[in-house]
Image (cartoon, rainbow, N blue to C red):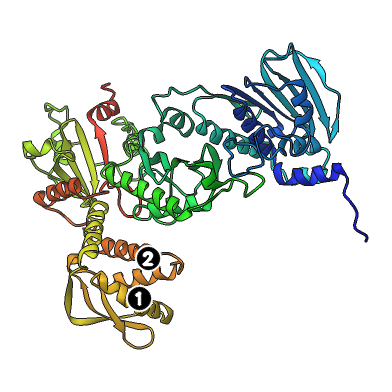
Amino acid sequence: MPVRQLSEATINRIAAGEVVERPASVVKELVENALDAGAKRIDILTDGGGRRLIRITDDGAGMTQADLDLCVERHATSKLDSDDLLAIDTLGFRGEALPSIGAVARLIITTRHASEPHAWTLQLDAGEKSEIKPAALSQGTTIEVRDLFYATPARLKFLKTDRSEAEAVREVVRRLAMSRPDVAFTLAGEERAPVTWAAAPANDPLARLGDVLGADFRTNAIAIDAEREGVRVTGFAGLPTLSRANTLGQYMFVNGRPVRDKLLIGAVRGAYADYLPRDRHPLLALFVTLEPREVDVNVHPAKTEVRFRDAGMVRGLIVRALKEALMREGQRAASTGGGATIAAFRPVTMPRRGAYDWRNSPARPAPMPSYKSNVFGLAEAEQASFDVGAPSADARVESFEPASEQVERPLGAARAQIHETYIVSQTRDGLIIVDQHAAHERIVYERMKAAVEQSGVARQILLIPEVVELDEADAARLVARAEDLARFGLVVESFGPGAVAVRETPAMLGDVDVRGLITDLAEHMAEWDDELPLERRLLHVSATMACHGSVRAGRRLKPEEMNALLREMEQVPNSGQCNHGRPTYVELKLGDVERLFGRK
């Protein structure tokens, strides 16, 4: 087949495939144009998930008749003053969005510039351009996109349901709304109730993020602000105890542009490696600001990826900023824990005495005991079961009087141990429930990290080396990393095929279950990515050892042991969550408890 020049219509439709992937892509391009035009209010309306209609109205600068005539031509843009692609300070710049959309749909643009006596309108139908006509519009621009992809029916088959496409549109608008809190957004459509995000006050940087991401994020967010060599990172990051199973709650912006960049996502993962397992991801919104010449935004037609001139420095800055903020707020636990605790309580409806019809039972009940009233309104027979110190078949609860000075401490004074797993402490204005294993696990972990950074973890020699049999591959992995394990006080060596001999263990772990520890380490190592940095792999080692060296659930603690644990939690960094991202304690204010009983 001979080489031939493609027609202009075909070229536009091919280009549209790069820019216009789905309705959400159209919304993104048009809203970015509105922001570049200086809009302070943007209204978005969709129908059929954007398949049938997308209408975007803004109060921006608008276009003159001449600009309107040129804006639908390929590679025509008002965003670049020169041909320098390294000096881009706008969201759009390629000049492809409008002609690409007009090539696959019915596009109507109505706009008015302040210098014009009235508005003008232009239509583009599958690439066919109409004459410009006068129109009525007070200010800004209104763009309608109807019957998206009707000119390329094959593309329609790749669209999802109207609800799915509408959700994708909503996600795009959410990201753009977070990037510009000074602009008011309204999103409406038959698939959803209208959502309005009013312009946020300049003195409350968390206002818009709280509106978009929800109240939980607002109350559990940590402020981020760091700068280095002209690059600044600001924003808010959620506590590790407020995490998700995917990265969809991570919002990244570079010079105001929403991006999904692997470098930034990797930096976040590295910063939270000490707080969350690999299958949990934090919620955050980070804004990276730097000179336009230090970042290339022309990597992809959709402009969702960027390339930094000094990628290592940017990554290091993000990791350091997040780690410092997490360390600063490490003793906080997510406020959602208290809310979830309150929600878990349900009023219990006791059966009315005598409601049970014993006459239909195969065995008649024993005679009812005599009852004497007491100050609590309970019978003596019932009162015995409410004795705090009385044993039960399920658990033992032991309570004791706290020292008055300890009640004033942040984590209060221990009052009881429940199910030999949870410590209940009393504070000046509420109570705290501590998971003793999770809390001690974080304490041991932080001790181990500090010891490794200084001179290595002290070891204790086993009187008789313990031989642990494993799969040959697991044993080989352990032996291959014997030198790294020795830094943590664990000395292992090969003991034939499929077995290792453990000669020394970390002294801080005490009487540890060696077989369980080695088995867990072997399982974790099998899942490691060899490309992970050594530091990340060593963190896995210390986290596993900390878990085995912590106070286990089911161990009864003395009052002084409980209070010692609370005091150490107040001193140790990151004690608000364990190594797996779970909260170590839940706090209930006195007002929360009173609400449970209808007292407030």
Residue 397 can be seen, yes or no: no
- Above or below: residue 135 compared with residue 559: above
Task: Name the secondary structure under disc 1.
Answer: loop
Residue 305: x and y, percent?
Answer: 58, 48
Q: Residue furthest top?
A: 117
Q: Earlier in the sequence, mark 1 or mark 2?
A: 1
The residues bearing labels 1 and 2 have C-alpha atoms spaced at a distance of 10 Å
- Given residues 73 and 214, the one toward you in this image is 73
Question: Which residue matches tag 1?
Answer: 481
Question: Which residue matches tag 2?
Answer: 537
Residue for point 74% across, 35% down:
76
- Above or below: residue 419 compared with residue 490: above
| Image quarter (top left, top right, bottom left or bottom right) of the N terminus | bottom right
Residue for point 62% across, 33% down:
32
**Relative to residue 584, is residue 398 drawn left or right?**
left
Residue 218: x and y, percent?
Answer: 39, 33
- Above or below: residue 477 compared with residue 228: below
The numbered mark at residue 199 is none
**Relative to residue 521, is residue 186 drawn left or right?**
right
- Amino acid type shown at disc 1: Arg
- Callout 1–callout 2 Cβ contact below 8 Å: yes
Residue 208 can be seen, yes or no: yes
- Amino acid type shown at disc 2: Arg
**Relative to residue 426, is residue 357 drawn left or right?**
right
Residue for point 65% across, 44% down:
302
Task: Name the secondary structure under disc 2.
Answer: helix
The image quarter in which residue 465 lies? bottom left
Residue 555: x and y, percent?
Answer: 19, 57
Q: Residue furthest bottom?
A: 496
- Given residues 276 and 356, the one toward you in this image is 276
